[in-house]
Amino acid sequence: MNEVGVLIVSLKGSYYDPSEFYELIRSANLEIKFSCSAILDKFDPKSYVRSGKLDELKDLVSVNNTSFVVVNRDISSSQHRNIQRKLCCQLIDRTGLILNIFAQRARSFEGRVQVELAQLDYLKSKLTREWTHLERQRGGLGLRGPGETQLETDRRLLGVRIKQLSTRLKKIKSRRRLAGGLRKKRGRPTVALVGYTNAGKSSLFNVLTKSDIEARDLMFATLDPTTRAMEVGRDKRILLTDTVGFIENLPPTLIAAFGATLEETIKSQLILHVVDAAHPELYERIDVVNKILRMIGAGNVPTVMVYNKSDLLEGLKQKNKSIGNKLIDSVEVSAINKQGISLLKRIIEENLYGAKNRITVKLSQSVGRLRALFYDRGLVLAEVVDRTGDIILELEVDRFERDLVLKYKDSYELLPTDGHNPDQELAARSI
């Protein structure tokens, strides 16, 4: 385990709790050798903190014989370079620390590609003027010095690698779209588990899908997305996806690089927003996750709030009640003692499928494939052929089948239901 020094910077007049940052350091498998705090009126544009604080930090680095200093803020490339020169040791900012954790956790090919792309994109900004110590060797006759040449070479090599990784991610996105289309065709809706990191998503995922993926009390313990089948009712199976955890000020490079993975969330039929119900900053973390969901385009996906770790709350009163057919948008559960799991499954089923409607449609003989698809999805209750040879099907559809029926609405004629019930017919036509 590497030993590091920590620089905690906060603005005067504002409260900052470093506990989450310390947890990030622990998750990166780093040990804190010393900690130094700085309270600033404003950030120094050249070195982020004042020269006096840098002198104090340099002494601490020398006394403790540390090679790395971690700062809890994101700093510019010039500030990064100036601090490193002053301290004579490596500096890691907040984004670099998170990327380090992701690099340790990535296991799948897709995860490694996404992390490497984010790392290179981050490194690209840190290359600026890294070789200025060679610029004095500039030759005559307008020739460029070797320092400038080296910098350009590094940029070019980085650009080539970034382009290669971006091409691979496009192929990954294409495969995910194909897989999503097959799932939809086979009648399996997808549900995504999202939430702040270390909210217990993986533990809940294991309980719901009877899996045994790694679940540890660490930030970003689960990085690679995992999808498993899950039963929510009689003859109803869904696909549940455990996604990467979110954090406040998630680096934009990570959001961009993990676009292929986050696409699973955008295209899911339902989101389970898992929250650590016992955390003191519960509502702040909910706001952070909602902000990121809107940022990636998943703000309009139906969402159920899942308050996990309810076993840690003293005097918990069970407030999860079902009222008729009303959709429930929150539930309290505990992945440890499995409290509320049965109710959560019923809520998922109700949100995805809802009440079934019976409709009658008329198909011509030329759309036999649509008839076969309806049979394949188990929607057909009865079939007759009229005098003209057209096929009349009585279908039973739920909320999840709406997209399918709407997709082929130009290939069939919707007929009045038996009894001409206006409400029932209106419900069918609203699909």
Image (cartoon, rainbow, N blue to C red):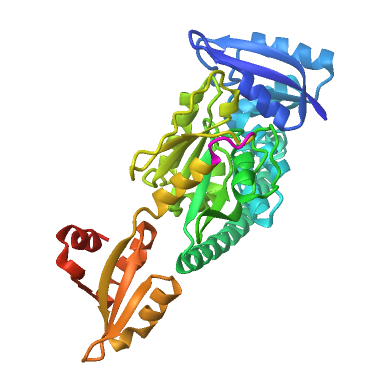
Query: Which quadrant would residue 426 be assigned to in this image?
Result: bottom left
**Would you place residue 212 above or below residue 25 in this image?**
below
Viewport quadrant of the C terminus: bottom left
Q: Tell me what residue is drawn at x 55 percent, y 41 percent.
A: 341
On the picture, is 420 further left or further right than 4? Answer: left
336 or 296: which is nearer to us?
A: 336
Q: Which residues are magenta?
A: 337-341
**Would you place residue 3 above or below residue 215 in this image?**
above
**Would you place residue 189 above or below residue 325 in this image?**
below
Where is residue 50 drawn, in percent x and y? Answer: 61, 12
Where is residue 265 drawn, in percent x and y? Answer: 48, 49
Q: Main secondary structure of the magenta part?
A: loop
Is residue 181 inside the magenta stretch? Answer: no
On the picture, is 59 further left or further right than 322? Answer: right
Where is residue 425 drawn, in percent x and y? Answer: 19, 63
Residue 384 appears in the rendering: yes
319 or 45: which is nearer to us?
A: 319
